[in-house]
Amino acid sequence: MRALVSVGSAAMVALLLAGPALAHDNYESWPVLSDPFPSTGGGGIMIHDYNPVVSGVQCMTNFRAVEPNGTTYNNYVLFDAVETKGGVLCTNGRWRSTDGGGTGRTTFRVFIKDGVKRGSGE
């Protein structure tokens, strides 16, 4: 029973710490997602077919990362979905290649409200 209280307390502390940070962003000022858009990783890589959808406590999408020379990587990203400011913030992104060759994290976030998807790599 003590472990459950500790886990619950840790989750509450995490939410309290995240709350003020989430409250300061003006998500509706972020640019509407375009297709394609530049990767936050740089190198001239463009992100194609990025269309996150919310499913429960997660946002997810398949996408393609295309290098300037045309080399294409098929990937999948999974975010935590956080309800805020009348919409859903997709944050804490974890991506992986569909062939299992790579994984990583992304600073890119998506805000979805009234069907409009906006992105910020800050």
Image (tube, grey):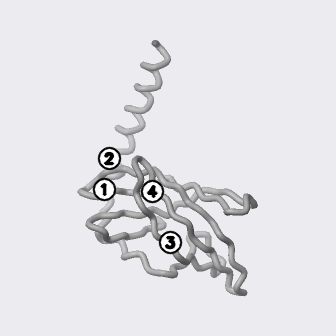
**Element type at marker 1?**
loop
Quarter of the image for residue 66 reads bottom right
42 or 7, which lies in front? 7
Which residue position holds label 2? 20
Whether tag 1 and tag 4 are in contact, CB under 8 A, the answer is no
Please tell me the numbered disc located at residue 59. Answer: 4
* SS state under label 2: helix
Q: Which circle, 3 or 1, is nearer the viewer?
A: 3
Crowd class of label 3 (few under 14; some 14 to 19; many from 20; radius 10 Å) = many
Label 2 near label 1: C-beta < 8 Å?
A: yes
Disc 3 and disc 1 in contact, CB within 8 angstroms:
no
Q: Quadrant of residue 65?
A: bottom right
Point out which mark residue 50 bears. 3
Q: Disc 4 marks which amino acid? A: Cys
The residue under label 1 is: 24
Single out the mark in the foreground, 2 or 3. 3
Q: Residue at x 42, y 69 (%)?
A: 119
Q: Are marks 4 and 2 in contact (CB under 8 Å)?
A: no
Q: CA distance from mark 4 to mark 2?
A: 22 Å
Q: Position of residue 76 (x, y in %)?
A: 59, 62
Residue at the farthest left position: 86
